Every structure is written in structure tokens, then in C-alpha cells.
């Protein structure tokens, strides 16, 4: 199986958990080769590098890794900086859509292309931003909404044309402690962001990873497809006004 973004916080947790379940894991990285190597050597897996926004690199990746039956498409980018749409540059908009939506499309295409008519499972990665929006990150929210909306729902109906048991699902994490949120998960920030959450904490990467593994499993999720599992402590929305 392949974990994209295996060099990141949630991806590394997925790689470890899939390996603990006995999977032969390929840990993907983009810039973080050393982090991927550390995870792979810990779990006895392989590594593969690719910029997932680059069509040729993605094609090369799937050629290199060989047959896969499971893919967890976890790689993504939350751009730093809260910028309202009226100030949002086209450059950042395009970069964010590329790094999230286009990278997920290219990953899905490459994975399903090599899968052919075999049975397999694909797990995509959205975000609560895609479900409830995120002021200051409309680019990221739009990309994640497209992943857990139109892309997921179309894919789940396409994959069964090749094999009747193929499944595609997604996780939608809320705030999760990882390199992506470094500097945003101090106790005061957690107190603020958890005001609309039943469970007043940020997730650990392992708490997201376990849902990815459950969705990928044909035993645990054999009749589950096209679903989005939100891992956000029962979050109901955001606080928009103080009073
Ligand atoms: N952390 C959160 O609070 C949170 C909340 C909601 C959703 N998510 C989603 O969860 C996923 C994992 O996030 P994380 O928290 O684990 O973040 P992270 O630690 O920053 O990991 C991001 C991963 O994406 C990879 N990546 C970024 N751009 C890439 C590109 N162009 N090509 C290939 N790989 C690329 C990175 O590779 P390198 O490091 O090797 O460059 C890294 O492995 C993302 O899709 C993110 O949007 C996270």
C-alpha cells in the first residue's frame, strides 16, 4: 500500500498503523526525504519521492512502486497566512488548488490506472475547512470541499465499473497536531478553537490515521464507500462573533 504525504504528521501515523496491521507500506515524500526514510526504516517499508502536482513525477511514482491495492492520499498543503478573498492572489489560489485538489486527482488517477480490474481501496483526505469553510483560507476550503464532494462522489461510482468491490472514502480532520499546525496548537489556541467542539482538544495524528485504516479495510468497511469520516471531536462549526 502507498501513503502519500508519509513524511508528514498524519501520513507518517498512517504508515505506522498500516504496517502494524501487516501491510507492505510505501512511504511517499516530497521535500522531506529524511523524515520518510526514518518512518520507512522504523516499519520496514520503502520510500518514494514525487511532487504530486507534477504529472510526470506522479506517473514515475506509480511506475516505480509497482502493484498496489490500497492508497491513502494524505498529502496536502494548508498555506500559512489568513487572507480574505479580496486580497488573495491568483498565484496562491492556484498553488493551493494544485497542492491539494490536483495532487489528489493525479494520485487517484495513477493509483486507479495501475489497479486496473483488481479490487482496491482509496482513502482521500479532506478537512473540516471543506465542510464548514474557513475564513482566510477560501482557497484551501474550496480545494478540500472539491475532494470530499464532487471528486469523491464521482470516483466511488467510477471505480465499481472496474471491480464491483472497489471503494473510495475520505477522512476530514479538524485541528490535528502535526508539522502543518506547528505554532497553532498552544493551550490558548486550543481553548479558542475547541469552543465549538464536544471534545476540547486537537487530534493526534494517530486518531486520524486509525480512521484511514478502518476505511481502507475490506473487513471493517466492506460496504462503506463515498463516505466522509470527520475526525474533529464533534466540532459543530466556528465561533464567528464574540457576542
Ligand atoms: N493538521 C491538521 O490540522 C489538518 C486538518 C485538516 C486536514 N489536514 C490534512 O491532512 C493532510 C496531512 O496533513 P499533516 O497535518 O500531516 O501536514 P504535514 O505534516 O505538513 O504533511 C503534509 C504532507 O504533504 C506532503 N506534500 C505537500 N506538498 C506536496 C506536493 N506538492 N507533492 C507531494 N507531497 C506534498 C508533504 O511532503 P514533504 O513534507 O515531504 O514535502 C507532507 O508529507 C493534508 O492533506 C492536510 O490538508 C490536516
Image (spheres, rainbow, N blue to C red):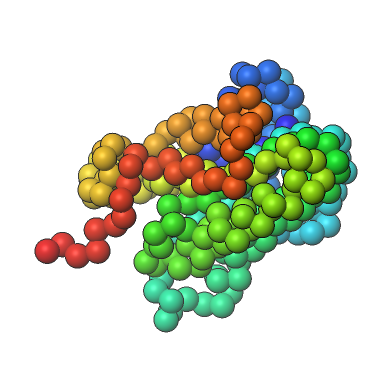
Q: How many marks?
A: 0
Residue 121 placement (x, y as % from top left): 69, 38
Image quadrant in which you'd find residue 47: top right
- In this view of the protein, can residue 204 be seen by the observer? yes
- In the orientation shown, which residue stands out farthest toward the left? 243
Image quadrant in which you'd find residue 45: top right
Look at 44% across and 65% down and name the residue there.
137
Look at 52% across and 29% down and name the residue there.
210
Residue nearest the viewer, comparing 139 with 119:
119
Quarter of the rendering occupied by the C terminus: bottom left
Residue 185 placement (x, y as % from top left): 34, 43
Residue 6 placement (x, y as % from top left): 63, 37
Residue 12 placement (x, y as % from top left): 58, 33
216 in relation to 29, above or below:
above
Residue nearest the viewer, comparing 112 with 49:
112
Q: Is residue 215 left or right of residue 241?
A: right
Residue nearest the viewer, comparing 167 with 18:
167
Look at 23% across and 44% down and name the residue there.
191
Look at 79% across and 49% down and name the residue there.
161
Quarter of the rendering occupied by the N terminus: top right
36 in relation to 195, above or below:
above
Residue nearest the viewer, comparing 64 with 116:
116
- In this view of the protein, can residue 77 be seen by the observer? no
Q: Is residue 211 left or right of residue 36?
A: left
Amino acid at each position: 500500500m502507498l501513503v502519500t504525504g508519509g513524511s508528514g504528521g498524519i501520513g507518517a501515523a498512517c504508515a505506522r498503523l498500516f504496517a502494524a496491521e501487516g501491510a507492505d507500506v510505501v512511504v511517499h515524500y516530497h521535500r522531506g526525504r529524511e523524515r520518510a526514510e526514518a518512518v520507512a526504516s522504523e516499519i520496514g517499508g520503502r520510500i518514494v519521492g514525487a511532487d504530486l502536482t507534477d504529472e510526470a513525477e506522479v506517473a514515475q511514482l506509480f511506475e516505480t512502486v509497482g502493484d498496489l491495492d490500497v492508497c491513502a492520499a494524505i498529502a496536502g498543503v494548508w498555506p500559512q497566512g489568513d487572507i480574505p478573498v479580496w486580497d488573495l492572489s491568483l498565484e496562491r489560489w492556484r498553488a493551493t488548488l494544485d497542492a491539494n485538489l490536483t495532487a489528489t486527482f493525479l494520485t487517484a488517477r495513477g493509483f486507479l490506472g495501475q489497479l486496473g480490474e483488481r479490487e482496491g481501496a482509496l482513502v482521500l483526505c479532506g478537512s473540516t475547512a471543506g465542510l464548514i469553510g474557513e475564513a482566510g483560507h477560501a482557497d484551501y476550503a474550496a480545494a478540500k470541499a472539491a475532494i470530499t464532494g464532487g471528486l469523491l462522489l464521482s470516483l466511488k461510482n467510477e471505480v465499481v465499473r472496474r471491480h464491483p468491490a472497489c471503494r473510495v472514502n475520505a477522512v476530514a480532520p479538524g485541528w490535528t497536531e502535526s508539522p502543518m499546525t506547528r505554532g497553532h496548537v498552544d493551550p490558548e489556541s486550543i481553548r479558542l478553537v475547541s469552543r465549538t467542539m464536544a471534545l476540547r482538544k486537537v487530534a493526534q495524528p494517530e486518531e486520524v490515521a486509525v480512521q484511514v485504516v478502518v476505511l481502507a479495510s475490506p473487513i471493517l468497511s466492506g460496504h462503506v464507500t463515498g463516505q466522509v469520516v470527520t475526525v474533529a471531536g464533534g466540532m459543530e462549526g466556528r465561533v464567528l462573533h464574540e457576542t
